[in-house]
Amino acid sequence: MLKKFLAIGFVLAFTMSAGAAVYKAGTYEATVNGHNAPITIAVTVSNSDIQKVDVTNDFETIGIGKVAIESMTKKIVDEQSLAVDSVSGATVTSYAILMGAEKALKDAGFDVAELKVKKEKAAPGEKVCDTDVAVVGGGGAGLAAAISAAQNGVKVIVLERLDILGGSTNISEGALNAVDPERQGKQGIEDSVEKFITQTYEGGHRVGDMALIKYMCENALASIKWLESIGVKFKDEVGTATGALWQRSHYTTTPSGNSYIRVFEKYLAEHDNITVLTSTNVDELIFDGGKVKGLRATSKNGDKITVNAKSVILATGGFGSNKALLKKYNTGVWSHVDLTTLGCTNMARSATGSGIEIATKIGAAVTGMSDIQVHPCGTPGTGLMENIRTSGRNRLFVNLEGKRFVNEGAARDVLAQAVFDQEGQTYWIVVNSVRYPSRDWVDANGATIANMVAQGSVIEADTLEELAKKTGMSADNLKAAVDGYNAVVRGEKKDEFGFLANNKADVELTAGSWYACKKVPTVHHTMGGLKIDVDTEVLDDNGNVIHGLYAAGEVTGGIHGSNRLGGNAIADIMTYGKKAGEQAAINAKK
C-alpha cells in the first residue's frame, strides 16, 4: 500500500493465550484455485501461533490479486485470525488465500472454527479534512486528475471506495488510441486527427458531442506524451483494440491497464501534496450557495469523514454493475436484450453509478444514459474479460458448430449482436501458436495458456480435429473456417464477412497447438453520464456550470455516442482526467 494512505479505522491485534493450545510446528501447504491459476499457500506455525503466511507461486493479476496476496497474508499473521476482511476489488484472490490458509492451519492442528470468529472492532469516529481539490474515485481518470492537479501546485485528496487503486483501468487491456505520426509512420499506417474524429463520431452512431470528441482526438497524443513524462512506457508499434476500427491503439510495454496505475501509484508515493483514502465511500456533495464546497464520506470501519475542498472532481466510473440503473436506462440500441442477465467487465463495486447519483441530487444533468456498450469478450458466468482476449489479430470467432459468423474486426456492437444471434448466445475464440508460441509464454495480460488450461477455462489440442472433438464442434466446419481465413490472409479470396487482412499484422494459422475459449456478450461501458463541457465542468439541466464540480472518465456522457470504439476509453480518461485536474487547480487558486 502507498506510504501515505491514511488508515481509517483501527485494527485489534489478537494473540492466542500462552498455553491455550499446542500446535505442530512447521510449514504446511495447500493448493487452491486463485483468480487466474492455482496458487499454493504456505503457512508456517510455531507451537503456539501463526508465524508466516506465504503464497509460493501465483499468477494473480498485478495491481489486484497481487495486492490481495500482500494484504491478506499480513492480516492473517497480524491478527492471528481467519476472520479478516477480504480486499474489496480482489475478492476471488482474497477468498482463495483464506481457503488455502484454513486448510494448512487445520493440518497444523488449529481450531479453524475459533480462528474464523469475528473480533470486536472500535467504534466509528469523525474526521474533518481540508484540501484544495478532492477527487472522488481512484481509478485511471481519478488518478490522472489528481496528479495533474498536483502538478499545478495544489493539495489533493483522493477518495476510493475499494481497498485498492486502479478501478476498471486495472483490469482493462490498456489500449490508448491516438494519431501518432512517428509510430504509425514507421509502420506505414496512414492516419489523421480528422479521420480519428470522424471514426469516433460515426462509430458512435453520430450522436456524440462533437466538441468533446474533437478535444479528445486532438489531445490524445499529448496525453501519451504526458504519461511518458511521468514514467509510462509504450511499445514502439501500435495495434488495433477490439472494435477500434483503425490501427492507432497504443499499448504499454508491461501488461494491461495496470501499467498506468503502477506509475500513478509511484508518483503519489513520491509527492507530498496528494493524500489517498482507500476503503472510503463518498455519500454526498456539500453544495452551498450554488457552489460545491466539498463532500461527506464514510470509511469501511464506519468513520464519518468531511472533506472541505475548493474543487471536487468526480471520477467514479460507469454503472455497468448497477442492475437497477441498467434496467431503467436500457432503452437504446440494446433495448431488445435484458442486460441485467449479463455479467459486467468492470469491477462490480466500482461500476455502480455512485458519482452520477450524488451529482444529480444537486441538480447535475445527465446525457446519453441509454447508450450502453456490450462487449463480445465476456467470460461465461462472470462477464469479466479473462483468459484469451478478443483484442489483436490472428484469432477466429466460430460458433458452436465451428463456423465463422462475423468479421472479427467489426465494431463492438456489431460483434456482440452477431453473438446474440448464435445458438446459446455464445461462441469460441480460436487461436494457435501464432498467439501463444508456448504453454508458458506470458501474454499481454500476464497470463499463460498453461494456467488457463489448469483452471479449465481454455481447451488445448495438438490438431484441429482434436480441438473439434474436445469442444463439440464439427471438425469439417472448423477446418473450413481456418482454411477460409488463411485464404483471405494470402489474398486469394475476399472474406464473406468483410474481414480485411493486414499483410503486416495477419498471418496464416497453420501449426498447433490450438486453443479454444468460450465467450459471451457482457456489459462493458456505459457511455452515458454526467453532462460536461470541454473544460470538464459539470452542467445542470439548464446548461449552466455547477461551480466547483468537475468530472472525467466513464462517469461522464456525450463523448462516445451510442458505441465506444475500442481504445477510446483510455484516451478519454487520460485526456479528460488531465484536463479536469488542471481546471480544478485553476478554480482552487481563485
Image (cartoon, rainbow, N blue to C red):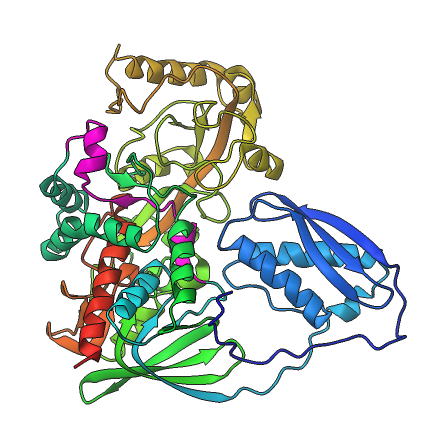
Q: Which residues lie in the magenta part? A: 165-190
- Going by the picture, which residue comes out furthest to the top? 492
Q: Nearer the viewer, residue 192 or 326?
A: 192
Q: Nearer the viewer, residue 207 or 187?
A: 187
Up-down: is 151 above or below 472? below
The answer to whether 314 appears left or right of 481 in the picture is left
Residue 566 in picture, x, y percent from top left:
28, 43
Q: How many numbered marks appear?
A: 0
Residue 272 in picture, x, y percent from top left:
38, 73
The answer to whether 417 appears left or right of 17 in the picture is left
Residue 77 in picture, x, y percent from top left:
70, 66
Up-down: is 318 above or below 179? below
Quadrant containing the C terminus in the rendered view: bottom left
Q: Quadrant of residue 9?
A: bottom right
Q: Is residue 184 magenta?
A: yes
For the question of whether residue 540 can be seen, the reply is: yes
The answer to whether 73 appears left or right of 260 in the picture is right
The answer to whether 205 appears left or right of 574 in the picture is left
Which residue shows up at 23% across the image and 35% down it? 183
